[in-house]
Amino acid sequence: MPEMPDKSASTESHRKLAAERGPLAFAIVTVSDSRTPETDTNGDYLRAEIERLGHHLVAYQVVKDEAEQIGQLLGQLAGGEAQVLLFNGGTGISRRDTTYDVLSQALEKTLPGFGEIFRMLSWEQVGAAAMLSRATAGVYRGKLVISTPGSPAAVQLAWEKLIAPEVEHLAWELAR
């Protein structure tokens, strides 16, 4: 019987190939009815982290939690140079939380594991309240779309544990 390939070696090989492709272009969208570019700590944090990894920010916007505005911005960004679209905010279950609803209807391919793992990691921080998160990720018009809750702790958790370690690999998979 043929020997099964070492999956971790394959993943590491893909990560290495992905890193060789050079910097990625990111867009940050903060969905909030109260934040502005001046008070958007999530945008500041993500911008600094993107640059720290050697990537660059090509678009940034704070948008109200209005489904039509989020949908228009998604379409606009999907037609631009950003390869990775990071949305934060609007993933809860309140009446005003519409980010998940808009994105989940638009995504052509979903990455269910992103939301599953995010909620698992959130459990360690907030306990059972982790179930309120509708964090999601997937592909829309060839772009990687990632959506997290808007709390700074959630954005940091998603970036450090999920996005930063795999974003180059994810973008590489989309481009091949």
Image: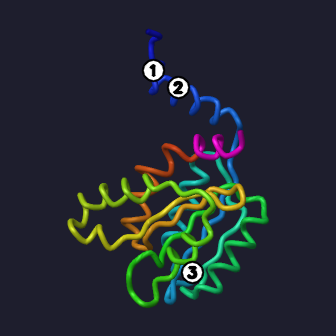
Residue drawn at x 41%, y 59% is 115
> Judging from the image, what secondary structure is the residue with disc 3 in?
loop
Q: Quadrant of residue 119?
A: bottom left
Q: Which residues are magenta?
A: 168-176
Across and down, in percent, residue 151 comes to 40, 72
118 relative position to 47: left or right = left
Local packing at callout 2 (Cα closer than 10 Å; few below 14, some 14-19, many 20+) is few
C-alpha gap between disc 3 and disc 1: 48 Å
Across and down, in percent, residue 158 comes to 43, 57
Across and down, in percent, residue 104 comes to 54, 70
C-alpha gap between disc 2 and disc 1: 6 Å
145 relative position to 176: left or right = left
The secondary structure that dominates the magenta segment is helix
94 relative position to 100: left or right = left
Residue drawn at x 50%, y 63% is 45
Residue 116 included in the magenta stretch of the image: no
Q: Is residue 144 above or below residue 70?
A: above
Residue drawn at x 48%, y 75% is 89
Query: Residue 10 bears which disc, if any?
Result: 2
Residue type at mark 3: give it: Glu
Q: N-terminal of the two: label 2 or label 3?
A: 2
Q: Is residue 169 above or below residue 151?
A: above
- Whether residues under marks 3 and 1 lie with C-beta atoms below 8 angstroms apart, the answer is no
- Whether residues under marks 2 and 3 lie with C-beta atoms below 8 angstroms apart, the answer is no
Local packing at callout 3 (Cα closer than 10 Å; few below 14, some 14-19, many 20+) is few
Q: Residue furthest front?
A: 1
Q: Is residue 18 above or below residue 9?
A: below
Residue assigned mark 3: 38
Residue assigned mark 1: 6
